Amino acid sequence: MQSDEIWQRAEIESPCIKICVIEPKSRLCTGCLRSIDEIGRWSQMSRDARQSVMDDLENRRPLLTQRRGGRAARLARD
């Protein structure tokens, strides 16, 4: 048995992509689409609860409101 196998766990990985910005209106992370509560509880959630969140993530994308425009919007105003 390799020593790495000892540390492997049969858990659902976090969907975090290290773009951690909470969108104020939906209160979802724009990177992983989880709620603040889900992010905070992730390590304590059961496998079934994590899978339920993972299964629903793409359905949440439309809940994010449109961005303010960033650089393109500033250039259009000038």
Image: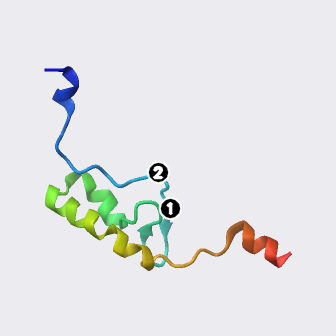
Residue where numbered disc 2 is placed: 18
- Disc 1 secondary structure class: loop
Q: Which residue: 22% across, 59% down?
A: 50
Answer few, some or many: residues within 10 Å of disc 2's Cα (few below 14, many 20 plus, some between 14 and 19): few
At label 1, which amino acid type do we have? Val
Residue where numbered disc 1 is placed: 21
Q: Is residue 68 left or right of residue 64?
A: right
Residue closest to the eye, 21 or 72: 72
Answer few, some or many: residues within 10 Å of disc 1's Cα (few below 14, many 20 plus, some between 14 and 19): few
Q: Quadrant of residue 56?
A: bottom left
At label 2, which amino acid type do we have? Lys
Q: Which residue: 47% across, 76% down?
A: 64
Q: Which residue: 44% across, 52% down?
A: 17
Closest to the camera, between mark 1 and mark 2, is 2
Residue closest to the eye, 74 or 45: 74
Q: Is residue 28 left or right of residue 65?
A: left
For the residues labelled 1 and 2, say whether their Cβ atoms are less than 8 Å apart.
Answer: no
What percent of the width, then of the height, locates residue 54? 28, 62
Query: Residue reaching furthest right?
Result: 78
78 lies above or below 30: below
- Disc 2 secondary structure class: loop
